[in-house]
Image (tube, rainbow, N blue to C red):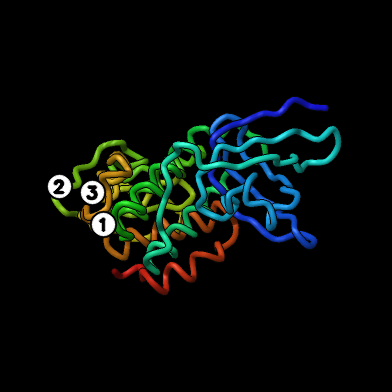
Amino acid sequence: MPAEESTPAIVLRARDYAESDRIVTLLTLECGKLSGIAKGAKASRHRFERKLEPFSHVNLHFRRRPHGQLVFITRAEAADLAQHVVDDDLAKIALGSYMLELTDALTAEEGEASGAYQILLAGLGALGVGFADSALRQAFEMRLMRWAGFGLEFGQCRACASISLDGGAAVYFVLSRGGIVCSRCRNAVPEGAIKLSGRSAATLARLSDLPIEDSPGAEPAGPDGALALARFISSTLDRRLRSQEFLDSIMPLKS
């Protein structure tokens, strides 16, 4: 029998299976993203403490199965891990659900993902002790996209590498380049672009380096910056996340 392993983990999604089991997908600190089956999870309070729900932060115990992708989850306990209370506010639920789904979309089964785990942990932590706002959303999006290899550049021109955003001049976000070009270089760049105010570009540049836990309450980019991020994420994933429509109805891009 394979040895039992354990690692801190955050539940990304879960669904009932058969009469008393659950199929759960978790992002772990040490083993990447795992999907597993928890036998009797709906009936066993001792082994799972009702901790196999989205947003739960648990110490996961599991055994790998010789055949099949699902691991066998033996226990899940809160231990002394930080817990994230997001179900006390609709905006928190919406933004938290989006964080989970975006993280799920950008991580691969059993691929190394300790960085994504830390970003998600910081995002949910900030959400749990604070509030949901556009600055937190934008900071989380940029930090997670950077981890996934899609570093976005809002601080300098992708073409000439020198631009001053303090003057407030408009710039252009080019999806295919993942960054801005200045007005002087715009004519030399044939790809379509989203026009951004200098202020929105400067704000996104600041948020990209701001610790996630410090982002709630910070100034967010305007609707043009929010649109640039949304378009880039959708083009990268080649789809629109289901949670995004709900989030946008609660926290519109213009907010």
Q: Is residue 180 visible?
A: no
Mark 3 surroundings: few (<14), some (14-19) or many (≥20) residues within 10 A = many
Closer-to-camera residue (11/75): 75
Q: Which residue bears the numbered disc 1?
A: 220
View extreme (front): residue: 46
Does residue 238 lie above or below 208 as drawn? below
SS for tag 3?
A: helix
Q: Residue at x 19, y 54 (%)?
A: 169
Quickly name the residue at label 3.
202
Label 3 – label 1 distance at C-alpha: 10 Å
**Is residue 146 visible in this depiction of the protein?**
yes
Residue 156 lies left or right of residue 167; in this view the side is: right
Tag 3–tag 2 contact (CB < 8 Å): yes
Given residues 95 and 183, the one toward you in this image is 95
Rounded to the nearest angstrom, the CA distance separating label 3 from label 2 is 7 Å
Q: Nearer the viewer, residue 120 or 228?
A: 120
Three-letter code for the amino acid on which mark 2 is drawn: Asp
Q: What's the residue at 27%, 57% (across, down)?
A: 221
Q: Amino acid at mark 3?
A: Ala
Residue under label 2:
166
Say what secondary structure mark 2 lies in: loop
- Point out residue 136 in the picture as x, y percentages from the top left corner: 33, 53
